[in-house]
Amino acid sequence: MKILLTGAGGQIGHDLIGALVADGHEVVSTDLAPRPPSHAHAGGDWQRLDVTDAAGVQHLFTEVRPDLVFHLAAILSARGEQDPRLAYDVNQTGTWNVLEACRRAKVGRVIFTSSIAVFGPPPSGPLPDPTPDDVALHPTTMYGVTKVSGELLCAYYRSRYGIDCRGVRFPGLISAAMPGGGSSDYALFMYVDAVRKGSYEAFARADTRIPLMYMPDGVRALLELAFAKREKLTRTMYNIASFSPRADEIAASVRRVIPDAKFTYAPDPVRQGILDSWPKALDDAAARADWNWKPRFDLDAMTDDLIPRVRRMLDLGAILSH
């Protein structure tokens, strides 16, 4: 199968490319930036693409004629609050451009990556815990606003043009890669800085609790949804869940492996506000029922697998910088 990825230079793209190439697919990876050194071994073709350039997107999609598109390109929550216009252009206009190009190039299926950022505190009180798929969406960030719009655009293109657009609402994703500007980055920095410095001052409170997921589970969820039979799916967008630890529980898990690691907490008002607006846990019953979704990693299993990977990532970074 010929598969095209947008935003392939990010965290998800690194692992997803490798999985798709290993399964024998013809993969065309695209991003505005050059292929990162960490992606060099993943395989497949790499082409420059700015999703905000409608003509460029259309030209590439018409040329490649992919069977399946993974639309990953996005500006994340914290960075998006620093530059809302950029977030709007990439996340909103970019998604429109990709869906229009899919319509014109007759792409049959599109996988959209949404986020827990679509949720926010409703006027009537706190979000249900866990939060189900169908609640009123009140995002508090431009990232969240554009992800809600992306979800609605996917549903529109599905009903209006027959494009099989389906997607997941990701929790905060953790992988052996440097964080990319999301509000959940404190969780990954607990691992990265514990390894490289032996300490980390989190920008979140110790009692902060949000849904998280280890990247191997996240990539597997995308693949399972992408290749699920359409008649089994009852929704366009699905919550997917794994575990929801407090920040100090992540710290305790890290100290199982790095006993001397020290963690302190200095909440950043803006990012803490974003974190507090998100669900504490997600109800993913629909994903489990429709396409047999089930995570494989809990917090400690992630910690045991992730810390050696972070060490290798930092060692490689040190080598490449010399």
Image: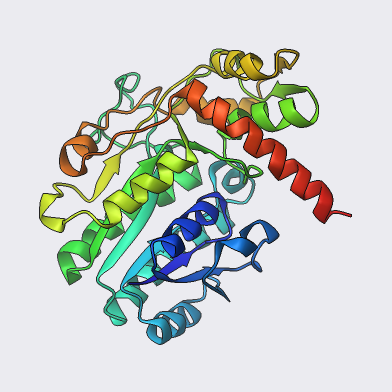
**Residue 94: percent from left, percent from top:** 46, 65
Q: Do we see residue 48 in this rendering?
A: no
* Quadrant into which the N terminus falls: bottom left
| Residue drawn at 51 percent across, 56 percent down | 13
**Residue 96: percent from left, percent from top:** 38, 67
**Residue 60: percent from left, percent from top:** 46, 82
**Residue 152: percent from left, percent from top:** 28, 54
Q: Do we see residue 169 in this rendering?
A: yes
Quadrant of residue 254 within the rendered picture: top right
- In the image, residue 215 sits, relative to residue 128, either above or below, namely below
| Residue drawn at 64 percent across, 46 percent down | 82
* Quadrant into which the C terminus falls: bottom right
| Closer to the camera in the image, 253 or 108 | 253
| Closer to the camera in the image, 88 or 165 | 165
| Residue drawn at 50 percent across, 51 percent down | 12
- In the image, residue 252 sits, relative to residue 305, either above or below, namely above
Most distant residue in the left direction: 231
| Closer to the camera in the image, 227 or 24 | 24
